[in-house]
């Protein structure tokens, strides 16, 4: 919870700073109130926003018995409340977890993941996501996604205003707007990298291995997911939510841009870490 409060505070300060640069004192006040509203919205509704963006559909034990049973079993083993379960209508295999706490959590898997992986591999992936729920990674990931998108929007607005001023004045334009447009995206990337440490993926992998007692299930799943992602990016994926997925939804595509938001360690390193656990018998 402390990390989330710190993140929200830093994001608010950045919002106020950008508002001041764009509109002086009035801009700063507007940015402050906007940030307060976004903090409230992102805490209570960011998970719903992300799920809606990917057109995720909630399923039950009646509609998807195998998937639901796997999640229920993992929740019981992890001593966690049963999360809501969703399927994303997407052929590219991937998965993520979201929510503000374990009592209000959701786990989502794409249709492609269920088709590509064996039931044991699916369990390894979902155990990884349940570990994120257990470690309270889900709220900070959802909050970061909402604010990163908003900051990127401010950057686009600054770029548009700068271009409009340039056209009217027939000069080189206001360097202030150019500066904001240039630094906004790296700032958004830095926020996500600060909030979503790569170490959380290793911890979730380790948690999954302990939860299933079969590190090889997740190892095999990661290998398949990584190979698939190298050739097929997810439709509708954006850089603001890429950090939430078990593997980068962009694969080898958009590397120049998505590398700014690279919060995933390499799949090879993750598999190597799981192999060490398997060998040591931990």
Image (tube, rainbow, N blue to C red):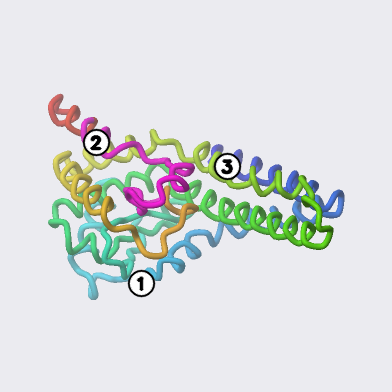
Q: Which residue is drawn at 20% across and 52% down?
A: 123
Q: Seen in the image, is 163 located left or right of residue 40?
A: right
Q: Position of residue 276 (x, y in %)?
A: 18, 27
The residues tagged by marks 1 and 2 sit, at their Cα atoms, a distance apart of: 32 Å
Tell which tag, 1 or 2, sits nearer the viewer. Answer: 2
Q: Kindly give the residue lying farthest to the top in the view shown.
A: 280
Is residue 263 rendered magenta in the image? yes
Residues rendered magenta in the picture: 244-272
Gap between marks 3 and 2, in whole Å?
Answer: 27 Å
How far is disc 1 from disc 3 in space, using C-alphas?
Answer: 33 Å
Q: Name the residue under label 1.
A: 57
Q: In this view, does 74 lie above or below 52?
A: above
Q: Residues within 10 Å of mark 1 (few under 14, many from 20)?
A: few
Q: At 27% from the left edge and 39% from the top edge, which residue is drawn?
A: 267
Residue 218 x/y as whole percent: 20, 44
Q: Residue 86 carries which label?
A: none
Residue density around tag 2, few if under 14, some if 14–19, many if 20 or more, within 10 Å: few
Residue 268: mark in rendering: 2
Looking at the rendered image, the disc whose residue lies closer to the viewer, 1 or 3, is: 3
Q: Position of residue 209 (x, y in %)?
A: 21, 39
Query: Is residue 28 or residue 83 the one in the foreground?
Result: 28
Residue ID at (69%, 53%): 35
Say above or below: 117 vs 21: below
- For the residue pair 92 and 163, the one nearer the viewer reads as 163
Judge the density around disc 3: few (<14), some (14-19), many (≥20) Cα neighbours within 10 Å: some
């Amino acid at each position: 919870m402390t990390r989330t409060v710190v993140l929200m505070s830093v994001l608010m300060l950045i919002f106020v700073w950008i508002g001041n640069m764009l509109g002086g004192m009035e801009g700063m006040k507007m940015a402050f109130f906007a940030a307060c509203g976004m903090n409230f919205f992102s805490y209570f509704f960011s998970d719903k926003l992300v799920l809606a963006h990917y057109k995720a559909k909630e399923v039950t034990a009646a509609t998807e018995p195998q998937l639901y049973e796997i999640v229920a079993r993992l929740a019981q083993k992890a001593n966690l409340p049963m999360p809501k379960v969703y399927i994303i209508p997407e052929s590219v295999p991937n998965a993520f977890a979201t929510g503000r706490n374990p009592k209000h959590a959701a786990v989502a898997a794409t249709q492609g993941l269920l088709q590509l992986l064996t039931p044991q591999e699916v369990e390894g992936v979902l155990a990884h996501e349940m570990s994120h729920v257990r470690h309270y990674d889900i709220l900070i990931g959802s909050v970061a996604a909402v604010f990163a998108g908003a900051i990127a929007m401010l950057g686009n607005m600054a770029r548009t205003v700068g271009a409009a001023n340039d056209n009217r004045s027939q000069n080189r334009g206001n360097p202030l707007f150019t500066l904001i447009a240039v630094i906004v995206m790296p700032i958004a990337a830095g926020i996500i990298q600060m909030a979503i440490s790569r170490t959380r993926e290793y911890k979730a992998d380790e948690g999954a291995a302990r939860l299933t007692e079969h590190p090889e299930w997740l190892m095999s799943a990661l290998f398949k997911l990584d190979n698939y992602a190298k050739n097929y990016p997810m439709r509708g994926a954006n850089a603001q939510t890429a950090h939430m997925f078990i593997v980068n939804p962009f694969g080898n595509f958009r590397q120049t841009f998505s590398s700014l938001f690279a919060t995933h360690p390499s799949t090879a390193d993750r598999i190597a870490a799981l192999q060490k656990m398997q060998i040591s018998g931990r």
